[in-house]
């Protein structure tokens, strides 16, 4: 009978633990409630009418307000962390993310992933893992489907490397693939005064740049509370004792926190862009720390009609978030790289009434 | 086709943008849920039994626990900010605020305002805007009705001033106007042990002063979380980058935060004053910052029976909140002005069982 | 007619105010909602599948997910504070705590206590009060029953001391008394992948020690938000103005906060120990302050079958929490006392599927 140290606590998977094609069922399904919605509101401050008021959602054709698209995303993402990225060096990006079903309070979300890419780094200390992850509701319907790259440490630099597999992923989600999670909107019942803006889909011009003006300062308690709500247990977000001794000296804020802040700030200029239909690509350019103030601006990259729908149209948007730098002059590239204030470069599709 | 800066993000209205009599429908109706109630509890710490326990509320005649009166107030107030006070210099006060319908989890609140007063300041840099605002539920019933003065910057000092209109508002809400939101209470089922105090309406004496004893220190994360829950987007509460360069050098805490803290502290001494029926007037005397500790004391200004009701009576209360100063000696006036520790002077009517 | 200072605000009971055998009905029953569950999740980060997902709970035999056992405990405990421990010097410990009914969102909890022990300290400045407290739901069913010792100040050192009564309490809850709050589990439907671990009751060995690996740093806003959610109004947790002048110079974090953090950390190694059936004893060894990082490890003290049940078995666990010290080497005793990093020594029974 063993007495003494146990191996029952999991330290997370390392690069050499992943196999191409393997499927991972992630732990801890999670029931989303109005409690999550209130907390999401309180931490990120979204003001899109459709997610805020059941009356508004019902008027335009939803059974009630769905939860914020990004709340559903963060919960699904959070489940993947324990299996995929507990030993990550860096979260490299997302691609081909589609929102396929609206999520409502009362739904239970679970997640699974398949390994679709593996490539050891030249230094043999780590490698890039690419997974396709899916979030499902309690009826087994896929609500979110996305690909993600992450750089994961090796346990043992000498462990043999798998053959490199680099998946081909689309630069952007096709317009035809948008809108599955959005029922036909009763356009006549969409109240622009209650929504906060008269600006419709057709009013946006390709190339138009919108400064979202406001800034929001992030506190340690806020990002910890949000990230735990998502059951994301990545260590770098919570443990000042160890992070204080690390490279950054600080707890690192979950990248998704920045995405949600930027989306909420974008209400000022994109108030009627009520649904994120897809994320084409997202990159965390620089880390965010507590005490920093986040600003954001957006550029309209494309404006596309949806086949067979005259109720809503799609806008492809690039939203750039910065820290400690207002965005009146739209900071973005700086020579070959990014302006040093940029922390997020997000390319996504939103739907807005026509 | 325009490419480049957009004018779709709103910078808020300035003094010269307001017209006497104009009606503003505010954006983003909001469904109030048990999530809001839990967060309100967690941030402010109220312990009034009627709002805390469905069983207690049902026993005395409510269908279930309504939400805290001030939670409803803050949500309604929050909607007015984007249209009224985004460019405010100072929030000058409230008057004639009546709570007309109980608000329950599941209700959706919306808000509108009418401009009832305008007066440019002598320096022509700003002016006082007075609005009457109303919050409605999903059935169109007015739940809260109040007047508010705010000093708003001018965009252009040379813009012509409107004729001055100064509305006449009552110094206090009439006793006859109280109680609409409170059903007839089953007095025999009002359990004083569960409510936390044997002290009834008739036990209070006019002129009696009550030190609420406890103090509560406010953190940045707390006031930001609460103020965002109310969808109040006033910039001074959230943006340390810009506020750090401003006059105060700090984020300013939403004045309503102080009102809710003072109300929660007042449980110790006013445990059976379970409903705020009206706010006669409220003034924010000095700003509150994170790290400050709030104390409060109350004076009974009047004790009045309600016509035709022997279940509950009304108490007119002045609650004074201070920062970093206990209230055992009831700090209030200091010569012509206020004691320097005073931050709030609130005059309101509460109902308590007889 | 009195005008002037009132005695309506309560300063809390002192040692000489307690009488052996007296029964205290505590104020402010509280309805527990999905809002509380979301906040508890967001503050403490539990990942046990049964409390996280209604689908998981239903599959194994619950009507839906009950709330975390410790959330129910903290709410019941919180109600006792105003009557028992407002003038406490120290919270000495718990014993014989049994969880007797599952608590679900929608339930309303109330609490009462009986004084079962009193012993003045030799210095006559304070004394030990021992109470047995019970939490009930809206049907009057006892959901939690526990004993607690607390050292309470005397108002007047010269007040006469009661005869000393020291209750006999069991060192541990009997195995036969476990399991009342846990329905028969559909073992075949208990999905180990979704639960996050293949380790079952029989896999644990007596004497086995598990390092839960992760650490979590606590912020002032977090513990204040949680402790207010529990309506625990002990002054030491909230008032920096007075605590800053006190012995510790800091707000003291509610001991229950540490218990919940340690329980959540213990998921990594005890993922299938889904229910706390009893707490045999709990001692807060040292105070925790904001900014500290909490770690935890556990030892299996006993593994016992439950009479007549082949679905779940009981594990007696000692969980030790430390501050600012990882637990890979299982810090515990240090000579006659505790390792200086230890802040909690908790001895409890959990149930896990067989």
Image (cartoon, coloured by chain):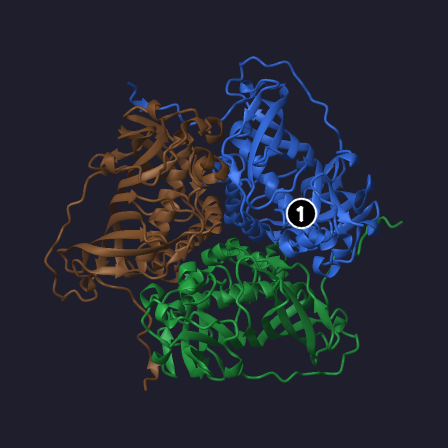
Chain colours: A green, B brown, C blue
A77 relative position to A320: left or right: right
Q: Quadrant of residue A191?
A: bottom left
Mark 1 — on which chain does it sit? Answer: C
What kind of element bears circle 1? helix
- Expressed as whole percent of the image width and height from the top left, the position of residue B274 reads 39, 35
Up-down: is A280 above or below C326?
Answer: below
Decide which of B277, A133 is in the foreground and name it: B277
For the point 54% across and 37% down, which residue is it?
C248
Up-down: is B97 above or below B165?
Answer: above
Up-down: is C300 above or below A341?
Answer: above
- Expressed as whole percent of the image width and height from the top left, the position of residue A334 reads 45, 81
For the point 23% across and 58% down, which residue is it?
B152
Q: Quadrant of the C terminus of chain B?
A: top left
Decide which of A168, C58 is in the foreground and name it: C58
Q: Quadrant of residue A189?
A: bottom left
Residue B339 seen in the current view: yes
Q: Which residue is mark 1?
A: C263
- Expressed as whole percent of the image width and height from the top left, the position of residue A337 reads 50, 81
Figure label count: 1
Dot 1, crowdedness within 10 Å: few (<14), some or many (≥20)?
many
For the point 69% across and 35% down, which residue is it?
C98
A306 relative position to B318: left or right: right
């Amino acid at each position: 009978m063993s007495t003494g140290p146990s191996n029952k606590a999991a330290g997370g998977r390392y690069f050499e633990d992943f196999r191409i094609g393997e499927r991972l069922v992630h732990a801890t399904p999670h029931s989303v409630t109005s409690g999550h919605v209130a907390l999401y509101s309180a931490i990120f401050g979204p003001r899109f009418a459709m997610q805020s008021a059941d009356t508004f959602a019902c008027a335009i054709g939803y059974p009630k307000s769905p939860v914020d698209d990004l709340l559903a995303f963060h919960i699904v993402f959070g489940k993947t962390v324990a299996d995929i990225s507990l030993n990550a060096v860096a979260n490299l990006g997302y691609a081909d993310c589609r929102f396929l079903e609206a999520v409502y309070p009362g739904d239970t979300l679970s997640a699974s992933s398949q390994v679709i890419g593996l490539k050891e780094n030249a230094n043999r200390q780590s490698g890039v893992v690419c997974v396709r992850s899916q979030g499902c509701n309690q009826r087994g319907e896929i609500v979110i489907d996305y690909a993600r790259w992450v750089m994961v440490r090796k346990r043992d630099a000498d462990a043999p490397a798998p053959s490199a597999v680099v998946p081909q992923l689309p630069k952007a989600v096709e317009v035809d693939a948008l809108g599955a999670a959005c029922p036909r909107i009763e356009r006549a019942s969409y109240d622009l005064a209650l929504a906060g803006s008269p600006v419709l889909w057709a009013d946006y011009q390709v190339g138009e740049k919108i400064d979202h003006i406001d800034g929001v300062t992030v506190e340690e308690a806020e990002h910890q509370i949000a990230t735990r709500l998502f059951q994301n247990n990545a260590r770098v977000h919570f443990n000042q004792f160890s992070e204080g001794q690390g490279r950054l000296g600080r707890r690192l804020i979950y990248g998704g926190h920045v995405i949600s802040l930027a989306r909420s700030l974008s209400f000022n200029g994109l108030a009627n862009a009520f649904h994120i239909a897809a994320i084409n690509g997202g990159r965390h350019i620089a880390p965010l720390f507590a005490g920093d103030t986040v600003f954001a601006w957006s550029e309209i990259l494309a404006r596309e009609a949806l086949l067979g729908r005259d109720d809503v149209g799609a806008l492809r948007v690039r939203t750039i978030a910065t820290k400690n730098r207002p965005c009146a002059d739209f900071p973005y590239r700086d020579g070959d790289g990014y302006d040093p204030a940029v922390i997020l470069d997000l390319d996504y599709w939103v739907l807005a009434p026509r």
